[in-house]
Image (cartoon, grey):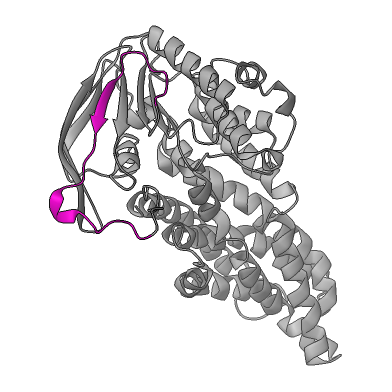
């Protein structure tokens, strides 16, 4: 059982690293949004550093959507999904393996790169660290919520638009608590721990509900 | 827990009926396959051959009837079969060896190493080539090599000879013969003789009320599974 999960995670990591993989795409998209905002807002450093965490989070949410539509669709099209259905493990484990690999190649690089991108929006050291930590805790929730939409639209051609419309509203709670946690680092009435705990809770709930729901959607899609 | 093809298994299908998008594809389909037996599923394009294989593989739920694989312990039907169909389950960015190693790790119960399996199908030279570089027939042979990297008692083959050259068709016939000699089962949807000795034949005919006017240009779409 562990062997099957390991094989799937390893394959998806290799695929993301190969040419045409989705690994670098969302990171570049993230960079583009964050880099364009200072040009649009002008060189007001105080304003930038005040809204910086929100910009990073917004960019992370949008970057997560990139590449999500291919999460299950690619496997549905070439028949790999039939192969996974024949593995001696429940489909839920296969979904968990795929989403984990997807987060390792999209969400984790976003969180790790965010201190660097924080420089572009004039964040100071603590705010950078805080934002990176909230992204690390919160991006799994985004990926797992997105996986449900990806599973629902797996057999729909050009399902990317439906996917975005389906999952964006469900990502809003994560966005709210992520930004409030990141901003509370810089000061304010809310202690940092409270929204961070809720963010962690959202990620854990999304991991369970998202996995089960995505597997159900894949079974039901035929 | 995982069945070995040396162990006798039996596939029993009774009164199977399938409906897709409200249309009855077939109904009242029954057959049984004992150890070492093979079944050729024939019928016109669009008759439901691929649909039958999809039902056997667990991708589609039948409207009525039952299917059971006996003497495999607690393993479910999809865990006891290989399916090689139009969608070959190969990733173009990965090499033939990586694709087969993945299948081996995913499906469990490993048999031949990817290198040996490819050599059986005469593709040893493609071991380190990305599958995207291979021709349609070579891709099909890589997909068929999957049959050899893991032991599974039931092989579901959908048009296995499509795009294969004459020599590879003979190799495939030999693989199926040795699989059956070891007690394995083969269900193949096909339009051609596959070199399956004393295979039973199941012909799927469309129910009369669903009969459509003759196809417009003679190239009716392939089975829609």
Picture layout, residue B73 above or below residue A207? above
> Residue at (76%, 71%) from the top-left corner?
A127
* Left or right: residue A78 compared with residue B26: right
Residue A17 vs residue A33, the one in the foreground? A17
Residue A69, image x, y percentages: 55, 62
Q: Is residue B222 above or below residue A116?
A: above
Residue sitting at 57 percent across and 57 percent down?
A70
Q: In the image, is residue B198 part of the stretch drawn in magenta?
A: yes
- How many marks are shown on the rendered structure? 0
Return the x and y of residue B37 as percentages of the image width and height.
Answer: 30, 15
Judge whether A115 appears above or below A169 on screen. above
Q: Is residue B171 found left or right of B72 in the rendered image?
A: right
User: Which residue is more in the foreground, A51 or B17?
Assistant: B17
Please say whether residue A191 is visible from this viewpoint: no
Whether residue A18 appears in this view of the structure is yes
- Residue range corresponding to the magenta coloring: B193-216
- Residue B15 location in percent, x, y? 13, 35
Left or right of B29, for residue B157: right
Q: Position of residue A157 (x, y in %)?
A: 48, 64
In this view, the residue in front, A40 or B199, is B199
Main SS type for the magenta part? loop
Q: Is residue A216 above or below residue A39?
A: above
Q: Is residue B23 left or right of residue A201?
A: left
Q: Is residue B172 magenta?
A: no
What residue lies at 29% left-to-right and 18% top-to-bottom? B73
């Amino acid at each position: 059982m562990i062997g099957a999960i390991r094989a799937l995670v390893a394959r998806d990591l290799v695929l993301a690293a190969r040419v045409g993989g989705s690994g670098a795409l969302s990171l570049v998209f993230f960079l583009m949004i964050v880099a364009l905002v200072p040009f649009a807002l002008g060189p007001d450093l105080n304003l930038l550093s005040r809204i910086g965490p929100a910009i990073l989070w917004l960019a992370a949410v949008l970057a997560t959507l990139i590449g999500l539509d291919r999460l299950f669709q690619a496997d549905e099209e070439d028949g790999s999904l039939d192969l996974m259905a024949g593995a001696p493990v429940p489909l839920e484990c296969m979904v968990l393996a795929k989403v984990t690999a997807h987060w390792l190649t999209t969400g984790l690089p976003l969180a790790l790169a965010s201190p660097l991108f924080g420089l572009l929006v004039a964040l100071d050291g603590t705010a950078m660290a805080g934002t990176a930590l909230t992204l690390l805790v919160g991006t799994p929730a985004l990926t797992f919520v997105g996986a449900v939409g990806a599973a629902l639209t797996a057999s729909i051609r050009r399902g990317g638009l439906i996917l975005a419309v389906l999952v964006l509203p469900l990502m809003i709670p994560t966005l709210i608590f992520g930004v409030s946690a990141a901003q509370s680092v810089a000061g304010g009435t809310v202690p940092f721990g409270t929204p961070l705990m809720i963010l962690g809770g959202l990620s854990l709930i999304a991991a369970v509900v998202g996995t089960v729901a995505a597997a159900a959607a894949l079974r039901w899609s035929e | 827990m995982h069945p070995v093809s040396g162990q006798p298994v039996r596939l029993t299908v009774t009164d199977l009926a399938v409906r897709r998008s409200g249309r009855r594809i077939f109904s009242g389909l029954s057959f049984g396959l004992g150890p070492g037996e093979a079944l050729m599923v024939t019928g016109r394009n669009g008759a439901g051959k691929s649909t039958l294989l999809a039902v056997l593989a667990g991708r589609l739920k039948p409207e009525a009837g039952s299917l059971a694989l006996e003497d495999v312990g607690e393993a479910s039907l999809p865990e006891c079969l290989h399916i090689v169909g139009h969608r070959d389950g190969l990733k173009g960015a990965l090499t033939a060896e990586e694709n087969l190693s993945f299948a081996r790790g995913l499906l469990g119960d490993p048999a031949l190493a990817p290198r040996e399996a490819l050599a059986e199908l005469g593709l040893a030279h493609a071991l380190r080539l990305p599958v995207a570089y291979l021709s349609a027939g070579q891709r099909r042979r890589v997909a068929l090599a999957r049959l050899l990297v893991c032991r599974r008692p039931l092989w579901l083959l959908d048009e296995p000879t499509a795009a294969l050259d004459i020599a590879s068709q003979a190799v495939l016939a030999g693989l199926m013969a040795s699989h059956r000699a070891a007690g394995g089962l083969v269900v193949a949807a096909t339009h051609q003789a596959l070199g399956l000795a004393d295979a039973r034949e199941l012909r799927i005919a469309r129910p009369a009320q669903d009969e459509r006017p003759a196809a417009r240009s003679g190239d009716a779409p392939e089975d829609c599974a």
